[in-house]
Image (cartoon, rainbow, N blue to C red):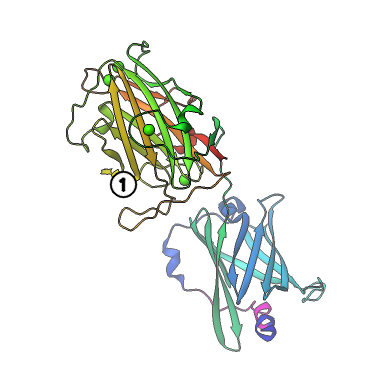
Amino acid sequence: MKAFLIIAIIATQIQAFSCKAQAFRTLEPKLENIAWISGSWHGKAFGGVTEEIWSEPSGGSMMATFKLITEGEITFYEIEVIREIENTLVLQLKHFGPDLKGWETKDETVDFPLKYITENKVVFEGMTFEKVSKSEMNVYFDIKEEEKVETVKFNYTKKIESTKPINQLISVKKASIKPKIDGKADDEIWANTTWLPLDQLWLGNPYTKEDFSGRYKLSWAEDALYLLAEIKDDKLIDNNSDPLMAWWDDDCLEIFIDEDNSGGKHQYTHNAFAYHIALDGNVVDMSTEKTGKLYNSHIASKRITTGNTSIWEVKISLFDDTYGDDKENTPLKLQVDKNIGFALAYCDNDNSKERENFIGSIYVEGEDKNKGWIDANIFGTLKLIN
Ligand SMILES: [Ca+2]
Ligand SMILES: [Ca+2]
Ligand SMILES: [Ca+2]
Ligand SMILES: [Ca+2]
């Protein structure tokens, strides 16, 4: 292992890369074009675990610390810099043993001159950084052993801090006895839970309380999130009998769920769901195929309407963002302290071609308030408590 690593540090004379990749558009040799390397990256290589922490560009350089741990012990450290010199970049590094004694002599560095930069690659002679996504990169490192060059791949992931603003934080109490999904609010948990308002106008003209009023309660158990919604609507409309036709234009209850409270875009992904529960109980959201799809297995619901008042009782199974439309998916088990992105809304149509009002549970900043179906950042946050 040691011999292998010592060879690694003299890997300065590197076989030239193929020029094939240069057919891509190349970017100026500036740090701003490689700033995506910044971050705290973790991965596996050399039979151990590695971390590589890159700073943002400043003062004409970026800097990293690297460490390799094998079998629970430090194998070596590196300090790396990428700096701008004479209209190009160079990556330089020095190695240190577990006791921080340098491997190179005082004035010696291991240098990797820049070859080129593309949108997703930074190619130095002997070391390439490849962006896979904003949270994943590969680093390819050439090791020259006699006349042979071996390329070692480091696959790194970065934990992305959520950028989601806190719009509303609701503590949701656990149900010791799960509510019975029968459209009746006589369960013990509902008696001991307070109403929350559904009163933010997201689309349409201001409405009267005869036209619409709504409130809701939430609870949870290990198997699901539970919702009780009381909706007063003067006219119930189901124009489209096909559940996948303009499902948002019929009266429906809409439940927004971002299981990990990550925020971010979700229009054609399952980073979050926007379930529309129709009056007939069908549940629709946009699939990754960019069409409406029934997700009836995610939601069990029952509505009982008396006069103009509907009680919707709903059990919502949660799925994480690895959910696939074409594979088997297992609902998550919920635990105390979990944060979930959530919003509730009602599409109210009384007699029009399109819905007249869209009323949500969250205040949305800005002119366009109908953003929940695309952007999970507008959701509120639920915190599961005992
Ligand atoms: Ca019930
Ligand atoms: Ca109405
Ligand atoms: Ca998410
Ligand atoms: Ca209506």
Image quadrant where residue 310 sits: top left
Can you say whether 39 is above or below 165 in the image?
A: below
Q: Is residue 276 magenta?
A: no
Q: Secondary structure at mark 1?
A: helix
Q: Residue at x 21, y 37 (%)?
A: 243
Q: Is residue 40 visible?
A: yes
The picture places residue 208, in percent across and down from the top left corner, at 36, 10
Which sits in the foreground, 59 or 172?
A: 172
Q: Nearer the viewer, residue 180 or 302?
A: 180
The x, y position of residue 19, in whole percent, is 46, 70
Query: Percent x, y for residue 259?
Result: 47, 44
Q: Which quarter of the rendering shows the N terminus? A: bottom right
Q: Is residue 314 above or below residue 30?
A: above
- Position of 358 with respect to 375 (left or right) is left
Check mark 1 vs ligand 3: CB closer than 8 Å? yes or no. no
Magenta: main secondary structure: loop
State the extent of the magenta-drawn residues as a range: 7-17
Q: Which residue is mark 1?
A: 297
Residue type, mark 1 in image = Ser
Quarter of the render that holds ligand 2: top left
| Image spot of residue 151 (x, y percent) | 54, 77
- Residue 9 highlighted magenta (yes or no): yes
